[in-house]
Image: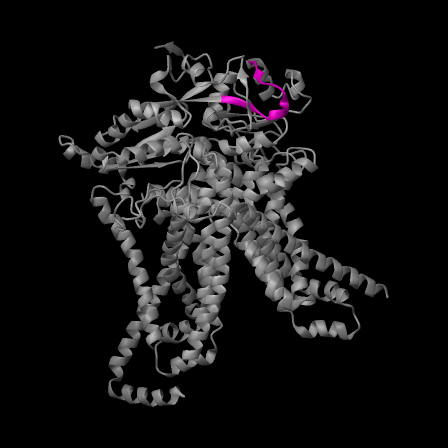
Amino acid sequence: MRAKTVDRIATGVIIAVAVLIMAVLAGLLGFLLVRGVRHIDFHFLTSFPQAIKEGGGIGPQLFNSLFLLVLTMIITIPLGLGAGIYMSEYAKPNRLTGFIRLVVEVLSSFPSIVVGLFGLLVIVNTFNLGYSLLSGALALTVFNLPMMVRLTEQSLRSVPREQKEAGLALGMSRWKTITSVMLPVALPSIVTGSILAAGRVFGEAAALLFTAGMSSPRLDFTDWNPLHPTSPLNPLRPAETLAVHIWKINSEGLAPDAPEIAAGASAVLVIMVLLFNLGARWFGRALYRKLTASK
Amino acid sequence: MKKSMVLLLTFIVALTLAACGNKSNNSANGGSASPSESASPSESASASPSESSGGEKLSGSVLAVGSTALQPLAQAVADKFMAEEQYKGISVQVQPGGSGTGLSQVSDGQADIGNSDIFAEEKLDADKAKELVDHKVAVVAMAAVAHKDVGVDNLTKQQLVDIFTGKITNWKDVGGADQKIVIVNRPASSGTRATFEKFALGTKTEDLQGSIQEDSSGTVKKLVAETPGAIGYLALSYLDDKVVALKYDGVEPTADNVKTNQYPVWAYEHMYTKGEPNAVVKAYLDYVLSEGVQNGEVVDNGFVPVSEMKVERDAAGNVTNK
Amino acid sequence: MNIPTSNVQSSAESGAKPRERKQRHVAEEIRGKIYVYFCVLLMIVTIFSIVYFIASRGLAPFVSQGVALKDMLLGLKWKPEGEPPLFGALPFLFGSFATSLFAAIIAAPLAFCASIYMTEIMPKFGKTVLQPAIELLAGIPSVVYGFVGLSVIVPFLRDTFPGQGVGVLAGALVLSIMILPTITTIATDSLRSLPNGLKEGSYALGATRWQTISRIILPTTLPSLLTGVVLGIARAFGEALAVQMVIGNAPHIPHSLFESATTLTSIITLEMGNTTSGSLHNNALWSLALILLMMTFLFVFVVRMLERRVKR
């Protein structure tokens, strides 16, 4: 009898906590969206920010965030796939592999500010890349690479052994088997995982303060030559991302509507993360269906 | 089979793109007007304009790094500068990052201009500071601010010192409401704090137990506006009706009082160059100091134009009439 | 289906030009190997250069600028601009440990409850609603957390408790929401991987659900649960901007949870930009970054110890 009462109380507590977490999340999202959404309109999303006047937008920041994401992925994906393939297929169970595993683990848990400072010291100053999108992308690669490596390794390991053996039995080389038999099978989970990882890039600020800079040149959205200084596509220009912009207007904003802009930008950021989450799931599922059906 | 080819191709494209990113960096360095010159601004900026110095049009790039307080002004001026027909070939970039960063980057040659809230002599070693040339572009004044309900609108110098050294801990001791004083200070390294301590308090203060410290004016303002009994200090541009600006020894913190040094809590905003600036950098600096900008952007951003100052002050704090 | 046919084909092919085929394979294999080894090497180089560069700055105060390591680790006064300058970082260490441990104390029970709910009580609802919701928490950027903390948590604490709202508790509350997903995800994974027989045996013996949870499930999964907690603490320890916005940043050991305090990360973000590179003050900040780096290694080490126990 007593045991049952305890059981009931414990179950009640656990359910209450689950409800509490849901409530906190709902409250958080509600707070951000209710405060922010009414400031979001086409003008807000596309126009330039204003330093001291009302009515500034977040157009360049939004573009910078997306562009930085693309740059980071261009650097991360090939490297991450390579190292992931090594970990799952070529690594022998010895000390060296253990050490590399440690490296991956440590890299992924470095505080972002430490990586930012490293970026400032080495990428920005020593390599002379300056405060630029490329510096930011390289710093972000430091976080994303270990995630990508783990993801690739896990996805490759979950490929059925028969498929791999079939490839080898065909007389293919090991490399060929990996790239043409195993990777396509593992692709859906790799894609899902990397989109989720990309969502984190979107929100990173501490490391970017020191590497990608806190301001953008006045971008000329009609000039798409990547070598021009005010072209949006130039990877060597400084760029303020959305997350950095929120931090900056919260701390230094002079515009009279700075709190509204911060709220609106936060809402945009949260919506983007939501979209990334849902998009990753949907895309992964669609890709899986496509790849398996065509097989 | 086909799919694997596509996959491989994707890799290759991705890799080449990454490689191109690096390459475009190198080639751009050889060219003239491109932000990649932020990579080696001192060389490139001096190289390209020297050829065209005889001609009409300048081209090159300017990188200014430093003070977060000066950044909005410098950026606004840069935008206007680049829009002018005769300066179309020049690209100016302004990065915040703090006065310290600005001074070290200009001293190391990574930036063309180092923006700073304080004299270089106060931060850098003497021999490094000597290489830098000071361009005072604006004057920033600071006011002590308090939460609206403290019931005080004037503090004497001594009262301020007592508050910031922790001798007075309640507003009623300075004639206000019975409310505990909460200090919202700046970090010890801050240029704003250095100015406030030097010219308002006249003494260095310690960080008190329980005091709040924020580096950014926006956060200071938010905390002072919301925390009952809070006192802090802000540049004049941040003042509005959310906080009460306190008079200092009975003098109101206004631009006019600053110009005559009646209100002494002010400092220069500096743009430092290493040695004399080259033609491109000089064009930008001259533009900042031009009449239109000094009475336009400088005033709009809450600064006091240098040209209107009736007094001059050197690094040691000695004031002379102009 | 395809396999036998192509096998025949390939053997026929290999009969024709076996050497050429083999060479092509070897070349392909070598190219692939070079590429993956290059990737791995790059990672190793990255980590060594991070440690090297940060250490090269961070050790300077001790090696050439006359600050004793003991004074930094145990000193209580941080007066970098004072005469003489003092670099006591104990208040920052205290602040970092206090906020991250407190955050874990708040978040861990919540996370355990959530993961038990998701695996034992309502697996279906948990998997379709609660888990994606918690994963979403992980995706919210830290500046947004700081923004919410400053506009909701700080005013709330200011009105309800003595003090100014900022402080260790405000920081810990913000951090606890941030690390909740980390702990929950790991806990849920380990609960799911528990062999079913163990649970069923317990139920068969007539144990209630709570008895099964508290006596069978929690003890057997404890090391993995702790792994989650340590990873959460590690994340909290390294978080910078969100904490800096709500903690108050006074360089002292606070007397209460509601008094302004500082963490290692927040003092670095506050002061790094105001100092000139090469100055003693600047290098001392790099030393703090080096301490952060060392803590990362420590956390990874602890996690590995725990994982070794899981395997045993």
- C266, above or below C232, in the image: above
> Residue drawn 39% across and 80% down?
A167
- C137, above or below A50, in the image: below
Q: Name the image colouring.
A: one colour
Where on the picture, by quarter, is residue C23?
bottom left
Q: Name the quarter where the N terminus of chain B is drawn.
A: bottom left
Judge whether residue B154 is colored magenta. Answer: yes
Q: Which residue lies furthest to the right in this view?
A: A1
Residue C189 visible in this rendered orientation of the protein: no
Q: Where is residue A112 in the image (x, y as percent from the top left)?
A: 48, 47
- In the image shown, does C12 or C60 lie closer to the viewer? C12
Q: Where is residue A264 in the image (x, y as percent from the top left)?
A: 49, 45
Residue B264 visible in this rendered orientation of the protein: yes
- Horizontally, residue C223 falls left or right of residue B239, namely right
> Residue drawn 22% across and 38% down?
B89
- B124, above or below C231, in the image: above
Judge whether residue B147 is colored magenta. Answer: yes
> Residue drawn 64% across and 59% down?
C225
- Horizontally, residue C300 falls left or right of residue B191, namely right
- Horizontally, residue B32 falls left or right of residue C129, namely left
Q: Where is residue C161 in the image (x, y as percent from the top left)?
A: 70, 36
- B5, above or below B13, in the image: below
Q: Total number of numbered labels?
A: 0
> Residue drawn 25% across and 82% down?
C19
Where on the picture, by quarter, is residue B75?
top left
- Range of residues picked out in magenta: B143-156
- In the image shown, does B155 or C94 lie closer to the viewer? B155
Q: Which residue lies furthest to the left in this view?
A: B54
Q: Position of residue B152 (x, y in %)?
A: 61, 19
Where on the picture, by quarter, is residue B47?
top left
- Horizontally, residue A149 falls left or right of residue B43, namely right
Q: Name the quarter where the C terminus of chain B is drawn.
A: top left
